[in-house]
Amino acid sequence: MEKVIDETVQGNTLSITNKKDNTRKLYIESYGCAMNFSDSEIVASILAKEGFNTTDVLEDADLVLVNTCSIREKAELTIRKRLEKFNAVKRTRPHLKVGVLGCMAERLKNKFLEEEKIVDMVVGPDAYKDLPNLIKEIDEGRNAINVLLSKEETYGDIAPVRLNTNGISAYVSITRGCDNMCTFCVVPFTRGRERSREPQSILEEVNDLWSKGYKEITLLGQNVDSYLWYGGGLKKDFDQATDIQKATAVNFAKLLEMTAIAQPKMRIRFSTSNPQDLTLDVIETMASYSNICNHIHLPVQSGSDRILKAMNRLHTRVEYFELIDNIRKIIPDCGISQDMIAGFPTETEEDHQDTLSLLEHVKYDFGYMYSYSERPGTMAARKLEDDVPEADKKRRLAEIIALQRQHSGYRLEQRIGKIDEVLIEGESKRSNEHWMGRNSQNSVVVFPKENSTIGEFVNVKIEKCTTGTLLGSIVKK
């Protein structure tokens, strides 16, 4: 199926290999972006040292944590329903404590703790190292809160526990926060300013993953292209760095190269990029190393210059086209995906048609598409009236999705007859006689198992496709 679902409302219960001497049980769910799932691995690592083993059985838990997302209203509604469920369980397990982590924690801290009294603990994305102290507070019967944002915290010194893993693919966080003040987005307010993780700690984590049998990593950040390490500090302060710091600074293109060289047999992905920050040297680095996947997730949000300006996207339609053209020129085989918002405040039918024409020009491989959801505290919520009728939002979104499905099919059909290297991730959902994996472009490929195994790279000849999946068979080497 096409990647047209709202990824911000998908939850996941996570489990780890537990320590024998731990006596308390942690149940943790994550919602939202990949960064939240990565953060949950950090939280599990911290709490494992505090005597907590994880459990997949809610009724066995001593502590329930929900790692939350505030990016869209639907995500918040889903999380609220889960909190109701947890409080119902609490009535049968009075000692059970419930905590909220992540972006909703920062935004709704007082409401959760004082007004609605539905949680015992609220912890922001930069305060996870304070969890041991906060748990002592709730153990003693007091509510606990820490939502302070940091200018330094990257959790680079914590080895994440890999949760609910297939043992094949893993996230490696490289940046935190965001300085791009898009008017619709809460991330700068919930995750703070942009700062980068020390490159050596990133490479050490990548090397450790390879030694444990992982075959693919995704370098992760709200805006990976803004990665810049010059000895510590915020990106915005780089102009005040010393000449030596500037001369030895590592940007994202250099980090990508260092990672590719460190583990030449490991497949490397990255997410997410921002059009105004993705530079040609990143694209050229991708083209230079075969283990860097030919896929870029490049959110655009709208095809209208007027709406892009209202969103504070800091790039124009023409500049975006130039970037796409450069990607296609340097990496002709590159898969490109998008994020798109329908019905942003003041959007007209003409603006919507501009979005459809942008889709026609690019013909993305897949995308994540949403109707506009006003988020309290953002510039759009403060300055712009949410004036597009809901019926128009739904119709425009449906038209965007329909066109994307058409383009997804077109891109898949282009691969028929080609031989793709596929990393086997697991069994096909529809047949235990078939494997599924992804090619370099991040498309799902399904094929007969034959004598191959999970975690193996195989060459698959693409023979046909469905609306969202490539089908083929293994080519013998």
Image (cartoon, rainbow, N blue to C red):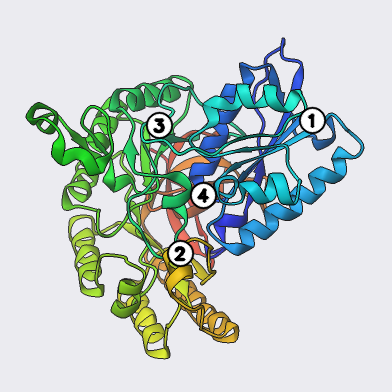
- The residue most toward the bottom is 349
Q: What is the spatial separation of the Cα atoms under label 1 and label 2, in whole angstroms?
A: 37 Å
Q: Residue flagged by tag 2: what amino acid is it?
A: Gly
Q: Is residue 370 above or below residue 270?
A: below
Along the polypeptide, which appears first: circle 3 or circle 2? Answer: 3
- The residue that mark 1 highlights is 61
Q: Element at badge 3?
A: loop
- The residue most toward the left is 243
Q: Element at badge 4?
A: loop
Q: Percent position (x, y) of residue 440? A: 37, 48
Along the polypeptide, which appears first: circle 1 or circle 4? Answer: 4
- Crowd tier of the residue under label 1, counting other residues whose Cα lies within 10 Å: few below 14, some 14–19, many 20 or above: many
- The residue that mark 4 highlights is 33
Asked if residue 91 lies left or right of residue 428, the reply is right
Asked if residue 10 lies left or right of residue 188, the reply is right
Q: Percent position (x, y) of residue 382? A: 46, 69
